[in-house]
Amino acid sequence: MKCSESSAGTTITRGRPREFDPETALAAALRVFWTRGYENASLAELTEAMGITKPSLYACFGNKEALFRKALDLYERDKLAYIGTALEAPTARGVAEKLLRGALATHCGTSDPHGCLGVISSVACTNEVDSIRDHVVARRASSEAALIERFERAHAEGDLPPPVDPRALASCLTTVLQGLSVKAQGCACPSELQGTVDAFLSIWPSK
């Protein structure tokens, strides 16, 4: 689908309005949000990166909050696809390893901004944008619920030793994942973060 570029404030003497690809524009917006967080990403920065005008942004994507939610959808679809794959691993440890390795590759790589978009945006939000924080937290809770369910199955199948609480283990892993994101955003050394992952996996509960 193509959207037409609005030219509010200018006079078009001939021809049709310039069209733009919403997916390309949304990917550009995602990068701005990922780098700056929701609150610090200004409309001027967003429209410049997207190559469109503010009226076109509103017409095609809605307001800034609606644009951010669409960017989150794209982020989860394209950047967090490893989560779904990880949950299908045959063992609980395999799930944890795939999640941790995937987080390192996604949040600590060289091609994308460092850190997790959800963590960056929820931490930076003030009370003025509670709806954004709540939305991000709700998405995170959904992911953690899926992880708890997977570990509960592992526990029932004997893949995890009886003393282990699947919910507590999922919370522990989620905390490590979020910590990796925060440290990655702070430009922590990749080898340090890799060491954290290796250390966590080395103390994984075994039968």
Image: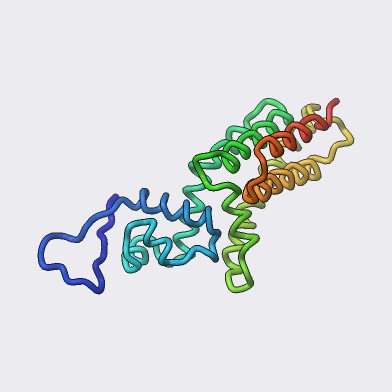
Where residue 65 sits: x, y (%)? 49, 65
Residue placed most toward the observer, 151 or 49? 49
Residue 195 placement, left or right of 64: right
Task: Find the residue positioned furthest to the right.
Answer: 163
Kindly identify the residue that appears in the image at 40 percent across and 65 percent down: 62
Residue 189 placement, left or right of 34: right
Residue placed most toward the observer, 138 or 76? 76
Where residue 100 sits: x, y (%)? 67, 36
Corner quadrant of residue 99: top right
Q: Is residue 161 above or below residue 74?
A: above
| Whether residue 6 is visible | yes
Corner quadrant of residue 123: bottom right
State the scheme by which the image is colored: rainbow
Residue placed most toward the observer, 164 or 196? 196
Kindly identify the residue that appears in the image at 77 percent across and 28 percent down: 157
Task: Find the residue positioned furthest to the left.
Answer: 14
Residue 32 placement, left or right of 150: left
Kindly identify the residue that appears in the image at 26 percent across and 61 percent down: 5
Which of the image's four quarters has the C terminus? top right
Q: Is residue 54 above or below residue 176?
A: below
Where residue 166 sits: x, y (%)? 79, 40
Kindly identify the residue that appears in the image at 63 percent across and 47 percent down: 187
Where residue 9 sits: x, y (%)? 25, 74
| Whether residue 145 is visible | no
